Image (cartoon, grey):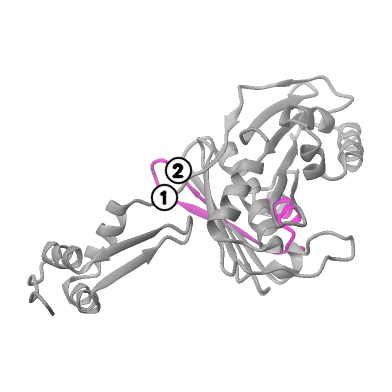
Amino acid sequence: MGPSYLVHAVGADGRLRVMAADASAVVREAARRHGTWPTATAALGRLLTATAFLAADAKHGSVTVRLAGEGPLRGAVAVGEADGRLRGYVGEPHVDLPLNGAGKLDVGGAVGRRGFLYVTYQPESGRAYTGSVPLVTGEVGDDLTEFFRRSAQRPAVVGVGVLVGPDAEVRAAGGLLVELLPSAVDELAETVEANLGAIGSISRLIEAGARPEELAGEALKGCDWRLEGGRLPLAFRCACSREKVEATLVALGPEELRRLEGDGRAEVRCHFCNAVYTFTRDELRRLAALAGGPAGRRGS
């Protein structure tokens, strides 16, 4: 499979707007980093894809989407940057439930059908702001659709899917976001609804070779439409670094760093990408000095 990317399209003289994405490579990398089991993989992959849409829509800054449900997944978080960088994690990666009544991975059961979806927009400058809605099904797409309707007050439909094979490998992942602008008429809404109903499984279309451009065309079938802008590459890329972790450790203060120094070493794991940063006793002694504490005794 090729790289992950997202496209924008507009149709019906600008009254319909579509974003379509193939996020297979992103979700595959996320699953590899976190060692997720199939149902957890599907939940995280759907959330990453939906977050890519929201971040691309925001155009600047970043968007954080958090699922806080009562299910065994113990929540999930994804962050998307406007340039296509994505990262995320689930509270419990080792979740794999029996298939639901439709024969699909039971993401709703893993997330939990009671709880909240939170979306936080962080502009490049200025204060962040957060909207929230109660979970509808926990299946991610339905919940984002509800967020657009109730919090953003925009009529949009979000469909996201992840196909996981018997070997637990991600075979395909992606989605669609279709928005009807205020000038859209009932006939357009009926056309879009019929198109979306005929598409079926987005992830299986991607596995069969459908590109985001073709997914957008299926959603806009029967309408004059065009692509707007080029492809937006999507990549799983974390913002963590050793320098940032060092700054966090220094902020703990000299007393806590001396305690860690006494243990001989310290390990810090990034929630978002699962990277592990290891610090030796000498490195902890140096950080304690930076924090304003005594250097400590050698051999302690």
- Name the residue rendered at 59%, 44% in the picture: 26
User: What segment carries the magenta color?
Assistant: 119-147
Left or right position of 87 against 147: left
- Name the residue rendered at 80%, 23% in the picture: 12
- State if disc 2 and disc 1 touch (CB < 8 Å): yes
User: Callout 1, which amino acid?
Assistant: Arg
Considering the image in quadrants, where does the C terminus appear?
A: bottom left
Provide the residue designation for mark 1: 127
Left or right position of 50 against 104: left
User: In x, y percent, where is residue 22?
Assistant: 68, 38
Q: Is 37 or 217 nearer to us in this picture? A: 37
Numbered disc 2: secondary structure: loop
**Residue 55 to residue 292: above or below:** above
**Residue 62 to residue 268: above or below:** above
**Residue 165 to residue 12: above or below:** below
- Residue 123 is marked as 2
User: In x, y percent, where is residue 163?
Assistant: 76, 50
Q: Is 90 or 68 nearer to us in this picture? A: 90
Does 121 appear in magenta? yes
User: In x, y percent, where is residue 267?
Assistant: 34, 67
Mark 2 surroundings within 10 Å by alpha-carbon count, few (fewer than 14), some (14 through 19), many (20 or more) = some
Considering the image in quadrants, where does the N terminus appear?
A: top right
